[in-house]
Amino acid sequence: MSLQSNKRSQPWMCQSSISSRKRRSMTGAASSRSWLQCGSIDASMLTSSQIQEKPDLILIDAEHTNAAVFSDFLSIYRLCQPAAMYAFHDANLIYSGLQNIETFLRHVGIDFASYILPDFLFALATNEGKRTLRPIGERFGLNRQQYFLNARNQVMMAHYEIVRHHFTTQRKLAP
């Protein structure tokens, strides 16, 4: 099962109509992955009773704040398979929240691996999910220290441009 969170921190889940035979022909093996249809709700409101099968692939593309991504992860990870893979879009905007997620996982003793993938994707796999993610991360992974440094600089420059634009506009309006 796969779970995706939309830009309003609301998970979207879709039921696959692909039969087991069709999945075998697509993947070369029987696939246990399915999608669940459930409409949209806030990630923190999602409960295990709303999910028939624990997801093992999760995309979080939610509100672009560090607090929101951390909250979404905490709300969703408890409902997922122990060996799950998480993908976070726009990693350059939420790098502190992603670091908080890694710190949390270390604190609670969950084994994980994470990679920054081009251009704005943070991929994280827990427990045995690491084996699936590792070849992709090792092949395409970016230097995380440099990535986070560049991301921080981009955010700082964006803030600078906002302030500069504000003061430039205010000078033009002043009598």
Image (spheres, rainbow, N blue to C red):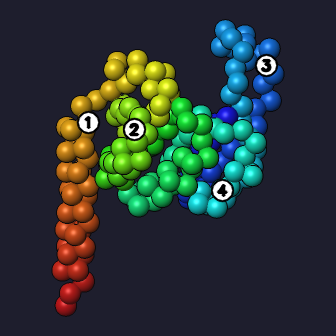
Mark before the other along the chain sequence, 2 or 3: 3
The extreme bottom residue here reads 175
Task: Look at the numbered disc 4 and give the secondary structure of its residue.
Answer: loop
Q: Residues within 10 Å of mark 2 (few under 14, many from 20)?
A: many
Q: Position of residue 61 (x, y in %)?
A: 50, 48
Q: Number of callouts in the render?
A: 4
**Alpha carbons under labels 2 and 3: distance apart:** 30 Å
Q: Which residue is mark 2?
A: 122
Kindly identify which residue carries mark 4.
Answer: 46
Tell me the crowding category of disc 4: few under 14, some 14 to 19, or many 20 or more residues within 10 angstroms, Cα based. some
Circle 2: residue type: Phe
Q: Amino acid at mark 4?
A: Leu
Q: Are marks 4 and 1 in contact (CB under 8 Å)?
A: no
Query: Residue at image x 24%, y 31%?
Result: 143
Residue that label 1 marks: 144
Q: Examine the rendered structure and indicate whether residue 168 appears above or below residue 70.
A: below
Residue at image coords 42%, 47%: 108
Q: Gap between marks 2 and 1, in whole Å?
A: 10 Å
